[in-house]
Amino acid sequence: HHALVLKREKVRKTYHFRAWKIDVSTVITAEVKQNVLPQKGAVSGDHERQVTWQKEVISYEVELELDTYALIQNLDAKKSGQRHKLWELLSDFIFAARDLACIAAEPSPLPLPPSLSPLPPGLLDERARARYREENGDDEEPIIGHYLYRLRDPRLP
């Protein structure tokens, strides 16, 4: 005899990396509120239990799993005195876990980066800069390098 006491639905999204994976899941759980047996003399087909559920509870899970194949390869290489990347493998895994924990602990979105002062005049090709501003407005400009202006308009030299 089995008693129905809980229902649980899980929707999982997995992100695969080289040596580990991250599973992000939404879990919907509900407990039985009432589990009623049918009355004697019930019509055929009504002999199954009538179940009502308590309000569903939604929770979220994050799982970080290290690939055992990569771990065993590096452990075997270390044991046999061969070149290995065990330190890199384990530290990257731990740093990923730490970073996920830090992001999860943020009470609000991360702040925007500060506004940077404009580049000094003469540093960029003014035609490329003018074309970029024409399409994107005067408020934002690339901050990494002048080649980004040329990417927007490959016709410029």
Image: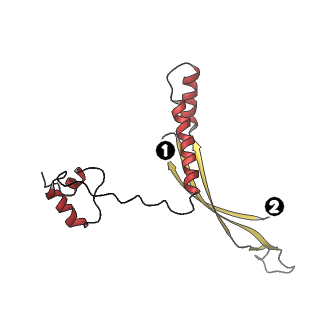
Q: Distance between the residues labelled 1 and 2?
A: 41 Å
Residue at 51%, 26% (x, y): give it: 84
Q: What residue type is labelled 1?
A: Phe
Q: Quadrant of residue 46?
A: bottom right
Q: Residue 14: percent from the left, percent from the top?
A: 53, 52
User: Crowding at label 2, few (<14), some or many (≥20) Cα neighbours within 10 Å?
Assistant: few
From the viewer's side, name the closer residue of 107 and 58: 107
Mark 1 in CB contact with mark 2 (< 8 angstroms) = no
Left-right relation of 27 to 148: right
Q: Quadrant of residue 108?
A: bottom right
Residue picked out by circle 2: 2
Left-right relation of 75 to 8: left
Q: Which colour scheme is used?
A: secondary structure
Q: Can residue 48 be seen in this view?
A: no
Q: Residue 27: percent from the left, percent from the top?
A: 63, 62
From the viewer's side, name the closer residue of 24 and 52: 24
Instruction: Give the vertical position of 87 relative to 43 (above or below).
Output: above
* Of marks 1 and 2, the one in the foreground: 1
How many numbered discs sit on the rendered protein? Answer: 2
Residue at 55%, 41% (x, y): give it: 93
Residue picked out by circle 1: 17
Q: In this view, which residue lies farthest toward the top?
A: 81
Q: What residue type is labelled 2?
A: His
Tell me the quarter of the image containing the N terminus: bottom right
Indicate the secondary structure of the residue bearing disc 2: loop
Residue at 54%, 45% (x, y): give it: 96
